[in-house]
Image: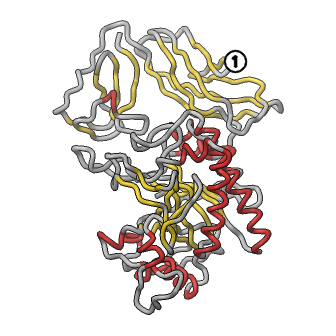
């Protein structure tokens, strides 16, 4: 996982990238610098609580000298006395009664509850006494923290399989308050330092059976603000710091479906999930996570006075229509300049049509914003090939053919360009971040 740490006014501002792996992989032997929570960066790892069953991976087996924070995954949301996700496409399609370490509980809708009470707080491990109120993994985490004072722990809520009730919680003020209050209680009762929300995903993109609604975009912000408010009160009362983070998607859809600017002012940092770009659902092998940093991602995560999301909205053999989004910083923009070759045009709106172009010619268009002080903020560049007056000369895409980066094909009346090696991936179904890039229509 790559992590972007984003500003919270009362904390800090830092922009860094760290690889985060599951603990079953990340604590292999090797020379790794000893972690310190006083550093300006964080080394964070997830402990998958289900690892006890399939991997026999115990909390005390972690070499926590190599990390600064552990995200314990995943707590659930109680709704109508049950938790879990019955979606048949999920990893564990069933529900359970809401429980704590003592058994079933009567919890209001939105309450954060244990995913597996036995493993988490009831199971006796070596050295435990049977009548201790808290045993299991939670006691082992507390022992790790005692022997490694630098270590901090998060309780992560949700995840891919158990995000089905986030939308319902976020949509109701009473449920948001229940969620926030239970977050504070969970931290205090079980000795966690921070809370992490892993909603996969607001508005769309998660399991088909998840509850979602268009209002998730705004409601997610409200939910986080309610949690932050309750944590602030707890900080003043308890005399300690309680952090709030989220795990976010890395796609443009996630950016569009959330209010990242407001979220960044509420949380302490954002963990960006830059993995699962390829996987077992495909018929080819490819990198699970990107090998190199894409500078365009910075546009979504760091407030800027430059225009963002520059895109082609139409074109002919001699013209192209462009559109873009206003700067995320909210700066007062006097005009936009669209530059290409040795020319530029000025517009007041977030769109422009450029004519007088040559058919079959490549053009690079850069959109910049000029603020009220006359300072120019250059935005991204988009490359466009003007349509030819003649019929498309590119070969039709074939499922059995292999294509390398830069090769172009014709598919359903449109031209696509491969970003890297591919075989069998349909151009029109590859998605925003995937292998094929739409070039335009065929004349």
Q: Residue furthest left?
A: 400
Which residue: 70% across, 52% down? 226
Q: Quadrant of residue 350?
A: top right
Residue 19 appears in view: no
Which residue: 57% across, 77% down? 151
Q: Tag 1's secondary structure?
A: strand
Q: Quadrant of residue 393?
A: top left
Q: Position of residue 396 (x, y in %)?
A: 23, 21
Which residue: 67% across, 23% down? 337
Q: Position of residue 95 (x, y in %)?
A: 40, 55
81 over 68 or under it: above or below: above
Q: Position of residue 267 (x, y in %)?
A: 66, 55
The front one of 265 and 233 is 233
Q: Which residue is mark 1?
A: 347
Q: Quadrant of residue 409?
A: top left
In the rendered structure, the answer to whether residue 51 lies left or right of residue 150 reads: left
Residue 335 appears in view: yes
In the rendered structure, the answer to whether residue 40 lies left or right of residue 83 reads: right
The front one of 414 and 254 is 254
In the rendered structure, the answer to whether residue 253 lies left or right of residue 267 reads: left
Which residue: 56% across, 37% down? 257
């Amino acid at each position: 996982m790559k992590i972007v740490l984003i500003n919270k006014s009362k904390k800090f501002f830092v922009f860094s990238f760290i690889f985060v792996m599951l603990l079953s992989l990340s604590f292999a032997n090797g020379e790794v610098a000893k972690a310190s929570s006083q550093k300006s960066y964080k080394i964070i790892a997830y402990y998958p609580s289900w690892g006890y069953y399939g991997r026999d991976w115990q909390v005390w087996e972690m070499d926590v000298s190599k990390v600064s924070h552990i995200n314990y995954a995943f707590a659930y949301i109680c709704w109508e006395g049950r938790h879990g996700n019955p979606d048949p496409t999920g990893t564990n399609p069933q529900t359970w009664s809401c429980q704590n370490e003592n058994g079933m509980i009567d919890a209001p809708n939105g309450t954060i509850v244990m995913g597996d009470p036995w493993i988490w707080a009831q199971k006796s491990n070596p050295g435990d006494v049977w009548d201790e109120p808290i045993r299991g993994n939670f006691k082992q985490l507390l022992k790790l923290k005692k022997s490694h004072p630098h270590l901090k722990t998060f309780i992560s809520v949700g995840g891919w399989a158990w995000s089905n009730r986030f939308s319902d919680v976020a949509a109701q003020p009473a449920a948001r308050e229940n969620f926030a209050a239970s977050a504070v209680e969970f931290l205090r009762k079980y000795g966690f330092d921070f809370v992490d929300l892993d909603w996969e995903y607001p508005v769309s993109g998660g399991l088909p059976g998840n509850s979602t609604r268009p209002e998730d975009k705004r409601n997610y912000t409200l939910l986080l603000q309610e949690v932050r408010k309750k944590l602030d009160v707890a900080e003043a009362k308890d005399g300690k710091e309680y952090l709030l983070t989220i795990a976010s998607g890395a796609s443009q859809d996630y950016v569009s479906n959330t209010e990242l600017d407001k979220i960044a002012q509420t949380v302490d940092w954002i963990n960006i999930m830059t993995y699962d770009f390829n996987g077992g659902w495909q018929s080819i092998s490819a990198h699970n996570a990107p090998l190199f940093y894409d500078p365009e991602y910075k546009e979504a995560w760091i407030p800027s006075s430059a225009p963002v999301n520059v895109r082609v909205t139409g074109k002919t053999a001699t013209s192209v229509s462009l559109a873009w989004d206003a700067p995320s910083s909210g700066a007062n923009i006097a005009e936009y300049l669209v530059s290409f070759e040795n020319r530029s045009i000025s517009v007041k709106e977030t769109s422009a049509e450029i004519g007088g172009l040559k058919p079959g010619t490549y053009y690079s268009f850069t959109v910049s914003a000029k603020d009220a002080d006359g300072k120019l903020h250059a935005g991204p560049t988009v490359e466009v090939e003007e349509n030819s007056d003649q019929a498309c000369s590119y070969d039709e895409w074939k499922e059995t053919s292999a294509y390398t980066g830069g090769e172009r094909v014709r598919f359903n009346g449109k031209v696509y360009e491969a970003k890297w090696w591919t075989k069998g991936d349909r151009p029109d179904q590859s998605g925003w971040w995937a292998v094929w890039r739409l070039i335009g229509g065929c004349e």
